[in-house]
Image (cartoon, rainbow, N blue to C red):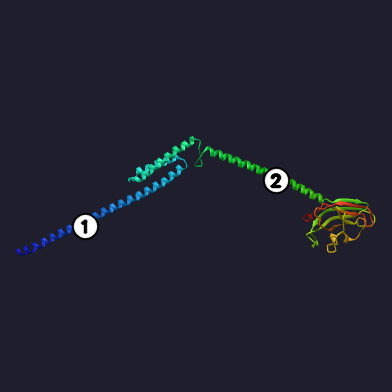
Amino acid sequence: MKIESEVTGPSSAAQERNTTVLLGAFAILLVIAMAIVGIGIASSKSLGREAECRDLTQYVDQQMRLIQKTAACYAFDDASQQITTTWERLDASKIQIPELRSRLDLEASRIKSMREFVQEKLQDGYVIERGVLVSQVEIQRRIDEAERQEREYLEAAAKRKAEREEWERKKAKYDNEVNRRKRPIELVHDDWYLEVGPSFWCESVAGYTVKQPATHRFLIVKVYVRNDGKRRHELPAIKLIDEDDAVYERTDLAKYKEQLDLGLLGPTLNPHDYIRGRVVFEVAHPKGRRFRLLINEGVFATESTTVKLFPLPCKFMN
C-alpha cells in the first residue's frame, strides 16, 4: 500500500499542472479572439461611417446644384424650400459634417442677397423674362425693333406686290401684243381672198441658216390665199419693202420644204382653190427697221396693197 501511494502521488501533480497550462492557454486564446472581434466591429463601424459620410456629401452636392439652378431662375421660394429640406436631412443624420453645414449656410446667404437684389430691380421697373432680368429700356428697345421689322416687312410686301402687279401688267400687255401680232389681216381684192398671218425673225428655217448670222435674218410671213373668182388666176406677187421703200424679193427656196414656199405649189389657182404656206425673205441689218408686205393683184397688175408687219421672235412660230 505504501508503494502505491508513492507511485500515484507524483502523477496527480503532473495532471494538475497540465490542466493549469491548458486553462491558461485557453484564456489567452479567448482574449485574442475577443480582441479580433472588437477590432472587426470597430472596423465595420468605421466603414459604415465612411459610407454614410460619402452618401451625405453626394446628397448635399446634388441639392446644391439643384438649389443654384432654381435660384438662377429667380424661383427663390422654391430654392429656400430646397435648403430647408437639405437642412432636415443633415439634422436627421447621426453624422455631423461641419463643412456641409457651412456650404449650406453660405448658399442660403447668397440666395437671400439675390432675392433682395431682384426685388430692388423689380421696384425699379425691371421684369423677369424667361429667367432673365430685363429693364424697361430694353423692353422699349425690343418693341421699337419689332415695330421697325414689321414696317420693313410690310414695305417689302407692298413692294413685292407692286412689282408683281407691274410684272403682270407688262406680261398682259406683252401677251396682248403677241396675240395682236399673231392675228391675221384679211384682204379681199376682186377675185382674191388673202390672209396675212404673223411674221417672225429667224436665223434658220427647215435646217437652212442665213449666210451671215451676225447681220442677216430670215423674215418669215405666214400667208393664206384663196381664189374666189370664176376662172383660173395667177397668184398675187408678194414682195417685201422697208421704210425707205427698198424692195426685197423672196429668197430662193429651192433648198426648203415645199410647204414653206407658195411659189413651189404652182403660179396659178383654180376657182375655189387655196394654198396655205410661208414666204421667206432674207434681210440684212433688220434691227430697228420697219417692213411692209407688198401684194400685187397679179403679174401684170398695176394696183398693189401693203400690209404692215410686226415680226415676233422665232420662238413664237409654231
> Is residue 8 shown left or right of residue 289?
left
Going by the numbered disc 1, the residue's amino acid type is: Leu
Nearer to us in this view, 219 or 62: 219
Q: Residue 120 at x, y = what percent? A: 46, 36
In the picture shown, does residue 311 fall above or below 146?
below
Nearer to us in this view, 132 or 211: 211
What kind of element bears circle 1?
helix
- Work out whether residue 181 can be spotted: yes
- Work out whether residue 206 can be spotted: no
For mark 2, what is the residue? 163
Please tell me the numbered disc located at residue 104. none
- Residue at image point 73% right, 46% down: 168
Going by the numbered disc 2, the residue's amino acid type is: Glu
For mark 1, what is the residue? 29
In the picture shown, does residue 35 fall above or below 153?
below
Q: Residue 63 at x, y = what percent? A: 41, 45
- Residue at image point 63% right, 41% down: 151
Disc nearer the start of the sequence (1/2): 1
Q: Residue 170 at x, y = what percent? A: 75, 47
Nearer to us in this view, 35 or 61: 61
State the quadrant of the N terminus. bottom left
Nearer to us in this view, 214 or 309: 214
What kind of element bears circle 2?
helix
Q: Residue 281 at x, y = what percent? A: 84, 58
State how many labels appear. Answer: 2
Residue 285: quadrant of the picture: bottom right
Q: Which of marks 1 and 2 is in front?
A: 2
- Residue at image point 28% right, 54% down: 40
State the quadrant of the C terminus. bottom right
